[in-house]
Image (cartoon, rainbow, N blue to C red):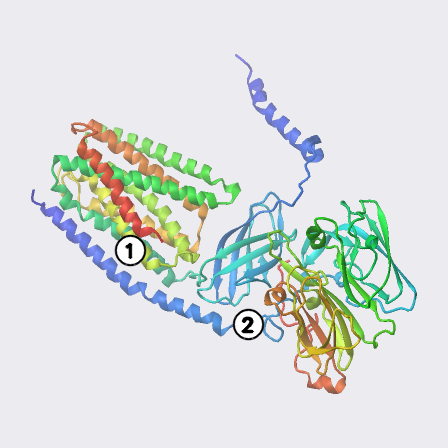
Amino acid sequence: MITPRADRWAILALLLLISLGAVAAWHWGRPSTSVRAAAQSHPMSHHRPPTLGSDTFQYVYPERRLASDQVYNPVPPPPTSQPVHEYELVVQDVEHEVAPGIRVPSWTFNGSIPGPIIRGREGDLMRIKLVNRGSVPHTIHFHGIHPADMDGVFEMVPPGGSYTYEFVARPYGVFPYHCHSMPASQHIHNGLYGMMIIDPKQGRPPMKELAMVMSAFDLDRDGDADFYAWNGKAFQYADHPIELKTGEPVRMYVVNLFEEMMAPHIHGNMFDLIRSGTALKSAELTDVVSLGIAERAILEFKYDHPGPFMFQCHFSEHMELGLMGWFVVNGDAKQKKASAPSPPTAKTAPHHRGAGK
Amino acid sequence: MKSRPLIWLSFLAPLVLLVALLVVFYRSSGGLRFQSPAPVEQVAFERVVFLPDEIVAHVRNVGPKEVTLSQVQIGWLNRASWEFTVEPSPTIPRLATARVRIPYPWTEGEPYEIVLFTAAGLPFSHKIEVATATPLFTAHSLWTFSMLGVYVGVIPVFLGILWLPFLRNLGERSYGFLISLTIGLLVFLGVDALHDGFEQAGELPGPFQGVALILIGLSISLLGLFTLTRYLERRRAGIQQQGSSPLLLAYLVAFGIGVHNLGEGLAIGGAYALGEIATGALLIVGFMIHNLTEGVAVVAPIVRSRLGKGEGAVSWLHLLWLGALAGLPTIFGTSLGAFAPSPVLAVLFLAIGAGAVFQVVIEIISQMKRGAAPALLTPANLAGFLAGLTVMYVTGLFLSV
């Protein structure tokens, strides 16, 4: 069969159409690559690290800030000379604000994570009453030297019940305390932990004191923590910086209560390290220390320069998920002039984006 | 005969009682005490846009209650909390959408994870395999995505149509083979579209009931085209126009393939826009080879018709219209998919396309039965059918990414 004339025309027309389309596509399709290349280079040239002094300041968000009364007070009770130290720790199931805007059901001592700071002096009597207003049995397990029935491992305190722990505080140092009901991983993760400070008999030189519990929260229980925090709330000291003065001696008690290594680190400074707080004098000058689970230390330092300084966990992930905050070091009038950056307070924090509320 | 008011009463009574019951239930929970142990929240990512120095996540609240977004984290090696804003509001009503703007200095080619935390602490995460700048709606990018449609849809169809002269020179047995081959192509296409549809339906948020969408899409095209065909045939029969039935069939095939290509284009454009297709060029080549067969399917019914001018002849202009009907929807698909992607529409059109293709298969078979063909299940026909499936399978190998 010979192809009819009309067919030939049809084929010619189709061929022409396709060639035109192909040429047009080849010609017009190409500029898109240059558009793409331009977009590609753009982010690099405008890279803004999320730190103070840049256009954006990552963690200052007026609309998302914790209210001031919700910030955990990092100042421990002052050392006392009483021979007996009585505390009452009430287990309460509350919704804890683990990061600005996120409240999760938690188990707490006295309604906060971490629990209250317990403080005594070596040789004094510690009397700590546990009152369980929670929904499951709890205990308190203290680190340190004490009798077996004061160890908080065997005597479960049922909901509605109470138990009083009594022991002589020794040795001096920094200690964690936490619930030891099984499964302990759940009881500790859900918030039942805190710090105990035992001062040496002769005391330590007076300084401005800070107590910092490092921990983390796995909200979806997938084995990866979602938020890390100084004293139980991610970014709280980023929103509410801690004010210091130049030349002012500072003693920071630090405990790690999470099942990962933590590495507390302060910026623009070095600290005298006293591991476990079980010595009077430091044996090491450094600016970062690795603390495994339940390990603790005393960091003593003094700022020479005024300005905002970050204190963080040196694991970047921990820092970026909440384990960071600011010391705002205020100098005297002379030094103030020299300080270039302004402290990250609500007044001066640069450029907030609205939260669209 | 019953009175009208009584009939209306019997219609209204159940509705009125239902409303009353709902009021009671809403107020007192009807004696049922359900306490949800954990907050039930669902947030679905619909689209992620990468702008210079900013990531914008389009999300929808597909949970039963309103939800408030409280924190955002961006995952690279590890997750990091990041500042963000939500438009129009961090509190999203049920089934409403919101845009989460994250001023993040992302870099091209990196993988990212976007995690949104609700006020109740539930994380919802979305992974981006390869970050790439989202095309903005400009003349250039519109042209680019239109050309993408031309490449994967229009050109292959017309190339396939170019086989017409060759096909016209086939003998009687070969003709049966060709028609059966076309059926094979179409069946493969339909099953493939259904598969894609179900796959995408599975990714749709629950309230959108992906499988039901497929049922609706299939029904629309199967029943709709059936009715339309019957109507057109009756009309043609009335005015005694011979030889138009093959052309009608060709248009039906073209229509089915066109709707299918619209769905396919939506999927391709959307995937490009979301940065999910890394090996773009290879995929385009794959689609060109694969869709070449669509051109063959379109002209197969008119292989025996006379082309050109004159009584009962098929004007060659029809070839253009057929190709356009089958191919052009791809262009709309890729553009729409790139700039206004809608997984719901993609599923719906894939299902409509599948239904249209199946309807055409039914139509062709009934034509074969009515026609002069000696028997339906001849060796040549069976071989053609199998060859059709095989061709689609082999050309489909090029599509594996």
User: Does residue B321 appear in the picture of this structure?
Assistant: no
The amino acid type of the residue labelled 1 equals Val
Q: Mark 1 sits on what residue?
A: B285
Q: Which amino acid does label 2 sit on?
A: Arg
Q: Tell me how many marks there are.
A: 2
Residue B39 vs B18, above or below: the answer is: below
- The residue lying furthest to the bottom in this view is A334
Q: What element carries label 1?
A: helix
Pinpoint residue B45: horizontal percent, then vertical percent.
Answer: 52, 52
CA gap, disc 1 to disc 2? 40 Å
| Numbered disc in front, either 1 or 2 | 1
The quarter of the picture where residue A63 lies is bottom right
Q: What element carries label 2?
A: loop
- Look at mark 2 in the image and give the residue it sits on: A48
| Chain of the residue displaying label 1 | B
* Residue B29 appears in view: yes
